[in-house]
Amino acid sequence: MTDIAAAGTFSLGDRLVSRMGYGAMQLAGPGVFGPPKDHDSAIAVLRDAVARGVNHIDTSDFYGPHVTNQLIREALHPYPDDLVIVTKVGAVRGADASWIPALAPADLERAVHDNLRNLRVEALDVVNLRVGGLHGPVEASIEPQVSALAELQRRGLIRRLGLSNVTSRQLAEARRLVEIVCIQNYYNLVHRDDDALVDEAAGSGIAYVPFFPLGGFSPLQSSTLAAVAHDLGATPMQTALAWLLRRAPNILLIPGTSSTDHLRENLAAAALALPDEAMARLNAIAAKT
């Protein structure tokens, strides 16, 4: 059994993926802008991830922009039959590397075509609609955006739809219009605002994919986490990832890195068993913040 096989699988719609995936954001340059510092290393990380059983890669054409998708295409095209590439739309990058919302229907269609072209595919496996603001979800109707993407799905350009940076109410609104296969929100063993949404999604068979935002909380800052990791003979990040895998069966992980050594370290977290006592100590971290 490989490391990531120990994490099990979960369905993204009709596609079964390993619960331990890979996030490609860090392959771009500093600030997720421009080319990678080491092109050959970026290609090597992608190929090594797939060789080790990863069949769920998270990306977006606004990473770079265009950089990560072009690297994925160069490294992996023609893609393995079981590989699911999840991308997202809803923003563009300014010339100053700023992140600019782009949620008009025309913006979303343009973004879908950018992803199709740079990944060199005829249809996108999963497209997440990124909404909300820099500091988290913002309650507002997303019906126009979801409807626009649903139309592109009907035209055969998108196979499945997901949401990113959204609330429970927005999930419900979207599900009245189209099937939603995944949610991608900010969540970790300290930032637990989405506890109820994780469980709601699990009850509906929807994948929950946590991300750690740039400049946001790093699990490595917790002394309790460091102590638990030491007791387990693991790194703090491995322990934080293992906690997420045990937290709910619908959680899929997409840790990112531009290093093959770090990639293998992250993937090894899938096989890390957390005893009940360790889980209790980790769960108590959120209560102290």
Image (tube, rainbow, N blue to C red):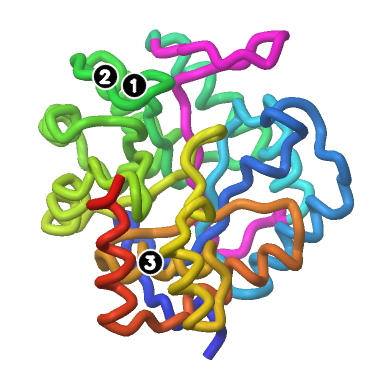
Q: Which residue is mark 2?
A: 138
Query: What segment is highlighted magenta in the picture?
Result: 76-103
Numbered disc 1: secondary structure: loop
Q: Which residue is mark 1?
A: 132
Q: CA–CA distance between discs 2 and 1?
A: 5 Å
| Relative image position of residue 5 (x, y in whole percent) | 47, 81
Which image quadrant for residue 170? top left
Q: Is residue 34 above or below residue 267?
A: above
Binning the other alpha carbons within 10 Å of mark 1 as few (below 14), some (14 to 19) or many (20 upward) gives: some
In this view, the residue in front, 123 or 245, is 245
Name the amino acid type tagged 2: Val
Using the rendered image of the protein, determine whether residue 5 is visible from the camera's viewpoint: no
Q: Residue at x 81, y 39 (%)?
A: 36
In front: label 3 or label 2: 2
Quarter of the picture containing the C terminus is: top left
Question: Are the residues flagged by discs 2 and 1 in contact, CB closer than 8 Å?
Answer: yes
Q: CA–CA distance between discs 3 and 1?
A: 28 Å
Q: Which residue is mark 3?
A: 16
